[in-house]
Image (spheres, rainbow, N blue to C red):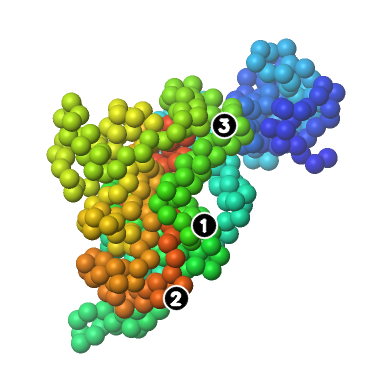
Amino acid sequence: MAAIRIANLLKSGQPGDSVTLQGWVRTKRAQKSLCFINVNDGSCMGGLQIVADADLADYDAIMAQLSTGASVEIVGTVVESPAKGQRIEVKAEQITVFGGADETYPLQKKRHSFEFLRTLGHLRSRTNTLGAVFRVRNVAAQAVHQFFRDRAFMWVNTPILTASDCEGAGEMFTVTNLNLNQPPLVDNQAVDLAQDFFGKPAYLTVSGQLEAEIMAMAFTNVYTFGPTFRAENSNTSRHLAEFWMIEPEMAFCDLLGNMELAEEFLKYIFQTVLEQCADDMAFFNQRIDDSVLATADNIINNEFARITYTEAVDQLLKADKKFEFPVEWGIDLQSEHERYLAEALFQKPVIVTDYPAAIKAFYMRLNDDQKTVAAMDVLAPKVGEIIGGSQREERLDVLETRIGEAGLPLDAYWWYLDLRRYGTVPHAGFGLGFERLIQFMTGMTNIRDVIPFPRTPDNIEF
Ligand code: 4AD
Ligand code: MG
């Protein structure tokens, strides 16, 4: 008999059904003549209660092996549960232990700190909280694809290995297959990158945007959803060296259209996760952050606030709050400023637009004031920036000037400039940091706990 997943069984199992199920033991409670075993297979938060009678074949031998962490297969019959809080349980007729787990198994019943669990990257997914996080993550990822498919956006795969720095911020990891102990040298000095794998410097991508723009110039509306890499040495609760980004890119679209899509998109993902992960979301609300459900409701039912950078700076100057980092027009907004805007001023996500050109990337479209660019950041309460985007500079001459001003080499961007030579159009897009979104949805405070295998400075064990 094929095994049934526990989520399905808990939902639709009926007393009398014969079932086979598989999973890992969470708890075992032995009484004189019977034993209660809670089994979880990752399909849902709640495990299934198994009741094993002492008259079961090999009862003592099985019970000796069957402890927290062991993997089991149970063949049995569904019965109504007399216990509170569960509709059904399964009376075991046959129990097979695939692998035991002795008392060194680190996830015994007590609650562990997330910090401790990070040292157990290979086991922590078996805990309630991380299990819930990764189920939410999965549903959110599927919702991303569904959202774009419903709107006829093409999913395009942009490269992970690249020669260009999309953000121009110099935060790239170098990729090489040279022997680092004995690299070939030019004139006995600098490393001869002409002899490297690609014949020139290569990196891990920080963003798929530039290639997404290429594809949008052929398919109109596209998006990427893939890993991106940043070698910024910031040990914060919101930064990873490897994170997943969703980047829609739309031809014939301006900043307003871009903002509309971003808002619609976030609402859709929240709505879908609330519907499909109701138990997990209730768990986060109860155990992690009691504003999780109210936040979701707020996102779905309210319009995001919109404010220009210049207005935002005015508001920050007027605020009766002393900021650590002083405010003046031209500064990059710091986390404390972003949080003031989203948490204190608006109490909901706020889209800040039209930032000073000098603090934003070269590809953002220069506004008529010649000082600001058609940029947009979506700032969320508690997490700060979750989306960064812009209308793109579609005018060849202006773009060339901006690349020069950014101190970037024009020739490296020849193909990007060609898009402005041949059939250029107004276009726009944004990047959503997938882990920041999951943080925002679940209330998890550390970004290392919303990706299965976080990469941060000095951390690449699992
Ligand atoms: O604002 P960013 O740098 O924008 C871009 O990369 C654009 N090329 C996107 C585009 O327009 N297509 O990054 C976008 C988002 C941020 O808002 C943030 O949510 C996330 O990516 N992000 C990070 N998430 C985790 N760890 C990091 N180190 C991150 N850096 C950015
Ligand atoms: Mg940004």
- Give the x, y percent position of residue 201: 33, 75
Residue at left offset 33%, top offset 76%: 412
Q: Amino acid at mark 1?
A: Tyr
State whether label 3 is within 8 Å of ligand 1.
Answer: no
Q: Is residue 329 visible?
A: yes
- Give the x, y percent position of residue 371: 22, 55
Residue 192 is left or right of residue 429, and the answer is left
Residue at left offset 29%, top offset 75%: 410
Q: Nearer the viewer, residue 326 or 231?
A: 326
- Give the x, y percent position of residue 388: 37, 49
Residue 411: assigned label: none
Q: Nearer the viewer, residue 65 or 2?
A: 2
Q: In front of the other: label 1 or label 2?
A: 2
Q: Is residue 226 visible?
A: no
Q: CA distance from mark 1 to mark 2?
A: 22 Å
Q: Who comes first in sequence, dot 1 or dot 2?
A: 1
Q: CA distance from mark 3 to mark 1?
A: 24 Å
| Helix, strand or loop at mark 1 | strand
| Helix, strand or loop at mark 3 | helix
Residue at left offset 43%, top offset 24%: 291
Residue assigned mark 2: 422
